[in-house]
Each structure stands twice: as C-alpha cells, then as structure tokens.
Image (spheres, grey):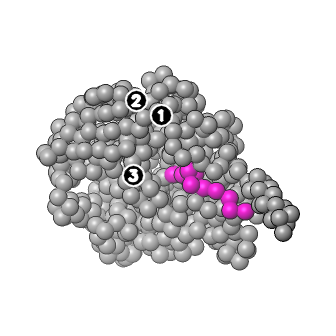
C-alpha cells in the first residue's frame, strides 16, 4: 500500500512537471511599436498591457478597476486631491527601483505640452503630481474627476522609468510579470517570465505573440497547433469547425470596439451628405456578410453593454430612398469618395459591402487597402481620407469627439462644453444624463456612420484557462493564464 501510494505521488509530480508552461497567442495586427504611452494602435496594448507594463490601477477581466502599482487611494472631500499609496519593493525589468518619483515622471511626461501620448486628454485635469515620499503620490486636479482611477487604468497611463522611457518603443522595460525577450518584426514578439516580479508569479514561463493577418492562415495555424489561442479570431465563418472539435474552446464575448464608417468631417462638411451616407448603410447586411452574424448594431459611439447606452439605430436606419433624397437636397451629384481600409477582416470585408451599398444610392468609392502602418500614417495622423472603417476598442471613449484635431475632425463647441462638464461631474445620475446627451448629439450630427459593436470571437486550446472572455480594454492579459493538462 505504501509502495503504491508513493508511486502515485511520483506520477502526480511527474505530470505536474510535464505541464506546459509556454503559449503562442495569435494576433491579426502587428504593433507599430511596443510603447503604450506613445502610440494609438490597439495591438500595442494587446501585447504589453498587464504583461510588461503596469499602471497605478488596471482593468480586471470584468471591467472593474483594480489596484495595480497602487495598493489603494484616498480622495479629498472636494474631489481635487487624490493620494495613492504604492506597492513597495517593485523594480523595473532593468533592476532599477520603481517609486513615487517614477509616477511623477510618467504622468508629467504623459501630460506635457510635447507629449506624444495618444490619450493625452486623460490627463488634462491634472494640475500637479508630487512625490510625498517614496511610497506615496499626491495628484492635484484643477477640477474634480470622478473617474480618475478609470483614466489611470488605461495602457496610456502605465508607469515607465526615465532611464528607459525613450527606448520603450523597441525595447520595453516595465514592472510587469513578463519581460521583453525579442521582436522578430513581421513575425512575432516573445516575452519571458519576470523572476523578480513583485506580485504573484504567472504560471506561464514564456509567451509568443504571433502575427497572422490572413484569416485562412489563422485557421490553419490553430488547426495545426502552431498557435495555442487566437483571442480575437479573424475568421468567424469557420467557428463552427472549432465548436465541433473537442480540442478547442470557442470563446464569444463582448468588446469595447465600436466599429464605424468614419467620415472626414472636413472633406464631408455637409451634414446632409453624412446623413445620406448613414441611411445608405444596411448594418445587418454588414454584420451578416463581414462578421457572419457576430456583432450588435449601434447607432452612436457607445457600447450596448454600458448601462448608459441609448439605442439610436433608428435615427440612421437603412433607407436608400431617404439617402438619395438627401444627396439631391445637398446637390451632391457624381460623388466619388476615397474609402481607406486597414487590414482587419471586418474592414476589408465590410468595405466591399459598404461600397456596394453606397453605389446603390449614387455614391462611387475608390477603395484603397492599406497596411496598418500606412493607415496610421495616412488616415489617423495625416487625415488624408474621405471614409474609413475601424473599430475603436478604447473603453468609454466618446470624449474623442471633443477633439477637433482627431482624425475625423469633428468640431462642435457645444459637444466640447458637454465633455468639459462631464469631466468635473461626480454625481452618477448627472453623469448618465450627460452621456446620454453626448450620444444623441453625435448621432444627430451624423459625425460618422455607426455600424456594430465588435464581438470578441476567440478560439483556444481546450486545455487553456484564464483567457479573458470579454475585452473591457484592448489586452491579452496572461497573468492568470495556465494549462490545465
């Protein structure tokens, strides 16, 4: 009996030792760089958020705001002074200590006049950041910001070190549970477990992010076992093949991704033309044809799972006759628009469908397929486009419509005042009312044509647990991922 028990223990130990500790994650887009404080591409956070870089706070898998490098915080009665207590004994991956001075550096850098941070607006209300002592940071605001912990949870607000900040784009140095190992451009990024991590060590020892833009290649890579999981799988038409295969688990959830037909409000300055384009779009046909039924129609830039969401789809309902009448009223005849499409399948497939729908009401399109770096340079930064299709995966980002220099160039002082009021409002009911008004304003101005909320359709090896079902932010958080067999 003793011999059999000992053998069983040895067998159990052997099984545990043999358990897989590396993972290969598939991604559609390769990040243009690896610094989340210096780029707008979602693919950056998909690699480094919570894995390499951490902020004072972070998003949990359910969207809750959790402590990260801060253990907790207090706020003054007037809501303008926030005091954060930091984790102690934290080091950056290069061995330098992380303390309050690094927080001051990071937030001052993010909000500086010459900052390249893509979400600089998150830090607008910060008046000063002070290191009270090595483990305490005081943030003073020019006006109350009730959701400051939410703002600080974004990837754009991670804490970086002055010694390595300038090279994070190609050699990222953070405080997270994984350290950067290598980047084979055009192919993969590799991370390894951080042996000096301040928190709970992850189960994985190594993670590889493999970039596979082609949907057919993504399907083949999963089937062959070359990729262990594809959290944002680009070929929803093949999901049924995985659902019937016990080797895999299909994970369908929601995202913060408002998928829009974005319009350049400078070249398309006539609201009648923008309204006509919106009425020419059949959302259900796009969801069925491009996403194979995965997606929720939206009529404004807000996630349907948000409690403050207003269903405004009727305001821009599919009505080709109305679209033709509006174009005639605007005197917009023989209209030809440039439709710039980035690589994701929702854009390429959806773009072909939208081009056909616009043609039915008398609008011709010139489709240009762009690589991701081209799209960022020409459309996002250069604003050289008429129409484009993109999913905005940043959480609760309706405030982008208050930025006249944002890529779709919507300039409405009344909306900007609305966002200013929202920024200093802490009462929940008042905030809800302002958010509803904001949704209605951009829908009534037909700033963009709102298509659908991007579903999170993932596929993973059935032995993997801990991957996020939903995407409260753009991340492939590996901190709780493990193999079960």
**273 lies above or below 189:** below
Q: Determine if residue 293 is in view.
A: yes
Q: Residue at the front extreme?
A: 2
Q: Position of residue 394 (x, y in %)?
A: 41, 52
Residue occupied by mark 1:
90
Viewer-nearest residue: 431 or 205: 205
Circle 3 crowding by C-alpha within 10 Å: few under 14, some 14–19, many from 20? some
- Report the residue at 25% width, 36% height from top: 139
Residue 124 higher or lower than 421, as above or below: above
**What SS does tag 1 mark?**
loop
Give the magenta part as a residue range: 475-485
What residue does disc 2 label? 99
Looking at the image, residue 22 sits to the left or right of residue 6; the answer is left
Of pointers 2 and 1, the one earlier in the residue sequence: 1
Residue 30, horizontal then vertical, whole percent: 60, 45
Badge 3 is on which residue? 66
432 in the magenta segment: no
Q: Secondary structure at mark 3?
A: strand
Ranked by sequence position, the earlier of labels 3 and 1 is 3
Question: Pointer 2 and pointer 1: residues touching (CB < 8 Å)?
Answer: yes
* Residue 130 position within the rendered picture, expressed as x and y whole percent measured from the top left: 27, 28
Residue pictured at 54% horizontal, 46% vertical: 200
In this rendering, is residue 94 above or below 319?
A: above
**Seen in the image, is 243 located left or right of residue 73?**
right
């Amino acid at each position: 009996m003793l011999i059999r028990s000992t053998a069983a223990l040895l067998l159990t130990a052997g099984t545990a030792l043999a358990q897989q500790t590396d993972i290969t994650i598939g991604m559609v887009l390769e990040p243009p760089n690896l610094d989340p404080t210096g780029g707008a591409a979602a693919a950056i956070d998909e690699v480094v958020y919570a894995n390499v870089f951490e902020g004072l706070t972070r998003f949990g898998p359910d969207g809750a705001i959790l402590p990260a490098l801060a253990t907790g915080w207090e706020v003054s009665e007037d809501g303008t002074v926030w005091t954060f207590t930091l984790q102690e004994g934290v080091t950056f991956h290069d061995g330098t200590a992380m303390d309050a001075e690094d927080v001051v550096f990071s937030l001052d850098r993010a909000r500086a006049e010459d900052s390249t941070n893509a979400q600089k607006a998150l830090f607008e209300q910060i008046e000063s950041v002070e290191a009270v002592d090595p483990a305490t940071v005081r943030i003073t605001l020019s006006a109350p910001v009730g959701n400051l912990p939410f703002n600080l949870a974004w990837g754009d607000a991670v804490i970086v070190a002055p010694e390595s900040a300038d090279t994070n784009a190609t050699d990222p140095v953070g405080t997270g549970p994984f350290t950067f190992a290598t980047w084979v451009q055009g192919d993969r990024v590799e991370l390894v477990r951080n042996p000096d991590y301040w928190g709970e060590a992850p189960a994985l020892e190594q993670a590889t992010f493999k970039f596979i833009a082609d949907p057919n290649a993504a399907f083949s890579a999963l089937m062959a076992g070359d990729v262990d999981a594809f959290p944002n799988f680009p070929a929803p038409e093949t999901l049924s093949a995985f659902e019937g295969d016990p080797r895999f688990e299909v994970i369908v959830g929601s995202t913060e991704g408002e998928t829009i037909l974005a319009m350049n409000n400078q070249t398309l300055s006539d609201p009648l033309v923008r309204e006509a384009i919106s009425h020419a779009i059949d959302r259900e046909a796009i969801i069925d044809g491009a996403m194979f039924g995965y997606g929720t129609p939206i009529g404004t830039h807000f996630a349907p799972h948000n409690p403050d969401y207003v269903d405004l789809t009727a305001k821009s309902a599919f009505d080709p006759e109305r679209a033709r009448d509006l174009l005639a009223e605007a005197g917009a005849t023989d209209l030809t628009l440039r439709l710039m499409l980035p690589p994701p399948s929702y854009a390429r497939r959806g773009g072909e469908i939208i081009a056909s729908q616009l043609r039915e009401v008398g609008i011709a399109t010139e489709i240009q397929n762009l690589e991701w770096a081209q799209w960022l340079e020409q459309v996002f930064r250069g604003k050289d486009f008429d129409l484009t299709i993109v999913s905005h995966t940043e959480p609760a980002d309706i405030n982008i419509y208050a930025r006249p220099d944002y890529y779709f160039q919507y300039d409405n002082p009344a909306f900007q005042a609305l966002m200013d009021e929202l920024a200093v409002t802490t009462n929940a009911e008042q905030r809800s009312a302002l958010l509803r008004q904001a949704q209605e304003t951009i829908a009534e101005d037909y700033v963009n044509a709102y298509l659908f909320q991007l579903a999170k359709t993932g596929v993973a090896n059935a032995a993997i647990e801990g991957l996020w079902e939903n995407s409260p932010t753009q991340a492939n958080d590996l901190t709780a991922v493990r193999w079960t067999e």
